[in-house]
Image: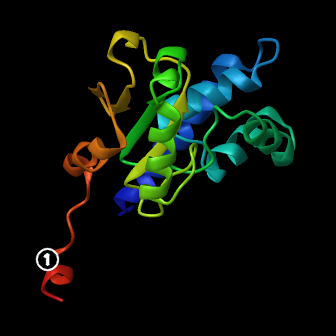
Amino acid sequence: MACECHATEEAAEQQILDIVEAHKNRPGPLIPILDEVQASLGWLPKSAIITIARSLGVPVADIYGVASFYSFFRLVPPGKTKIQVCMGTACYVRGSQQLLDALERKLKIKAGETTPDRQFTLESVRCVGACSLAPVIVTGEDCHAGMTSAKIDKMLKPYMQEEPAAAKRG
């Protein structure tokens, strides 16, 4: 009897093979393949890069080179909650850079990184289309308007991972 994780890996590999097959006869298929695989898996694990390379008959280093060159590809799994700080003009002039700096200090990561516990991924984005609410931070599906550094702890609280009961007793 195969374990559930092995079945999941096989399903993911088949999904990648199907994506490659759908694109491989088109000109310049690599970026659309990587994009679709990432949309499906949430990131580009090493196993996916190897599967793509084998399917296309190109060196793994070539696939990795493209995936690591473009900032929109993720080579590490994203955090449970994505935090997007809007850096559009309206948000920027109203202090979004200070918000990003405060979040980097609070989470101990830089924009584009994920916390070691994979709780949060911090991103700097160009515009979220909520200029009249500036400055804006988007967490998951929630839009936080008129943000200040003082409001960050309250904003993060619902997304914070609870400590295990054993650690609380500790």
Q: Specify the farthest residue to the bottom.
A: 170
Along the horizontal axis of the image, is 137 left or right of 144?
right
Where residue 79 sits in the image (x, y, percent)?
A: 42, 49
Residue at left 27%, top 50%?
A: 153
For the N terminus, which image quadrant? bottom left
Nearest to the observer: residue 16 or residue 123: 123
Does residue 8 sit above or below 21 in this rendering?
below
Per the image, label 1 sits on a secondary structure element best described as helix
**Which of the pair 113/107 is nearer the observer?**
107
- Residue toward you, 30 or 135: 135
Which quadrant, please, contains the C terminus? bottom left
Which quadrant of the figure has residue 36?
top right
Tag 1 residue: 165
Q: Position of residue 158 (x, y in %)?
A: 19, 47
Residue type, numbered disc 1: Ala
Q: Residue drawn 77% across and 44% down?
A: 64
The answer to whether 28 is drawn above or below residue 13 in the figure is above
Q: Quadrant of residue 43?
A: top right
